Image: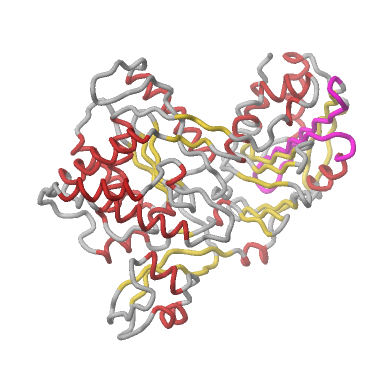
Amino acid sequence: MVPILGALKIIAMRLPVRASFLLLHVMVSGMLIPSTRGQFFVRSTEQDVKEGAEAAKMIEEQIGLYSLPRAGEYLREVGSRIADAVNDPRWTFTFHIADQAEPNAFSIPGGGVYVSRGLLALLEREDELAGVLAHEIIHVTQRHSAREQRKGFLPGLLSVPGKVVSGVVSENLGSLINTPIEAVGGAWVSHYSRGQESESDRLGIRACAKAGYDPGALAQILARIDRAVKSESGQERKFSIFDSHPMTETRLRDIQKRSAGLSPEAKSPIAPDRGSLLAKLDGMWWGENPDQGIFQKEQFLQPVLAFTLSLPPGWKHRNTPRYLISAHPQKEALLLLGVLGPESDPEKIGEQFVSQMRTKARLEPASARGSSIGKYPAYVATYLDRSGRGPVYLHFVWVAMNGKTYQLIGLAPERDQETLRSAALTLRPMSGAELAAITGKRLRTASALPRENLADLTLRTGNVWSPDYTALVNELGAGAVLDQGQLLKIAREERWSPSIQPDH
């Protein structure tokens, strides 16, 4: 089909939004079975690096990278020490914080390693982080392949209409609608084989010992993550590292048994004590990151860009660092919102798009005209596709508002036209009161009073975690009596303020 580059550019945006629902884990390499025993590799290392670059871009666009420079630098220092111990010159390793609330870690072909802020929040020792990073580094060096699973958020939506939607939109906007929707709604989870997991554990703990870390710490952080995930029973199942790295009692015993025969080299940790470690994580968002935007029922509020939009009631809403999406529960209609870039003339953008559609796709709009959303200038181009089982309208809307050009795309049959229109008309700047009301939970460090228990500390410090969860993340017993000055991780509800730029 004919590519529509302009349409691609229109919604190739950098909109920060909530990422906790995202389950994208890794872009797999698609190799033949690799191993350390010299079996033949179909792919070259150059192909791995190229594919890894593509995967890194997708991760940044669909999950997002989290910005906390002291934590990011710490991650890179520990990772570099492990990479030096592995000493595989084929790869250039990079280390990033994934903006995921869930405990997760993954790697991509070529050397990209990602650890979620949800996992960082569960760390008690530097050795635990080293164990996680070493495991992921070995997946890269051993070029482990994986079976890719895709679960669609809107399977079949774009195949129901006729040639305009399934051709122009589905194929030419496929990288922005079809593939992201699959990742948004379900999972791209790499399920490593049992042998690959065992190999990464075995070689990873050796690398840890060589780098000066306790090789048994991997088992400790895995067990804590397992307890944290199980503690959320009764709530909606969230993604965790165990979706892609299954944990069994046998696996833990194997790690512990193999670690017992290894002696760490004498090297000082980068964070010399627990207080130093907690200081590097202090202030990190825990749970939802309000920088990414928040939902208050059907209202979406994006404080970084200071806009809000009310989405159709009863529809399914998702967001990624590229766009906000809302879909009809029966998958019959769709609304996308994103940012094109700096504020510009919506009419010029719209007319250029219409011209492109006419020239390259031989499509004429049912209507194309200047308009407005509230007091903000807009341009609306509508296409009608009658070639499917029923007529489907495609709306492209550009709005210039407060220094940005926003793009909305709507697909709907006649009966949902008014729903789309009503939602689009709610796009507006956030009020000062709305901005002031946005809060989030930040990871903080609290110092205990003499003989204080966890319930009293929770009450005194404004900790939003229960005493039981506070005990879990701090590796304490639920009835622990604390020493004076003992440092604990807590989480506090705090007013949102702009964050710094992402780590790269």
Looking at the image, residue 100 sits to the left or right of residue 310; the answer is left
Whole-percent x, y for residue 447 in the image: 33, 76
Whole-percent x, y for residue 316 in the image: 71, 46
Q: Is residue 7 above or below residue 330?
A: above
The residue stretch that appears in magenta: 387-416
Whole-percent x, y for residue 305 in the image: 61, 50
Evaluate whether residue 243 shows in this view. Answer: yes
Magenta run includes residue 322: no
Quadrant housing residue 472: bottom left
Q: Is residue 501 above or below residue 10?
A: below
Q: Tell me the residue at 60%/53% (across/down).
A: 293
Q: Tell me the residue at 26%/47% (across/down).
A: 255
Looking at the image, residue 388 sits to the left or right of residue 249; the answer is right
Q: Tell me the residue at 23%/37% (across/down).
A: 203
The secondary structure that dominates the magenta segment is: strand
Evaluate whether residue 81 shows in this view. Answer: no
User: Closest to the observer: 340 or 370?
Assistant: 340
User: Closest to the observer: 328 or 348?
Assistant: 328
Whole-percent x, y for residue 116 in the image: 42, 49
- Which residue is at the far left? 266
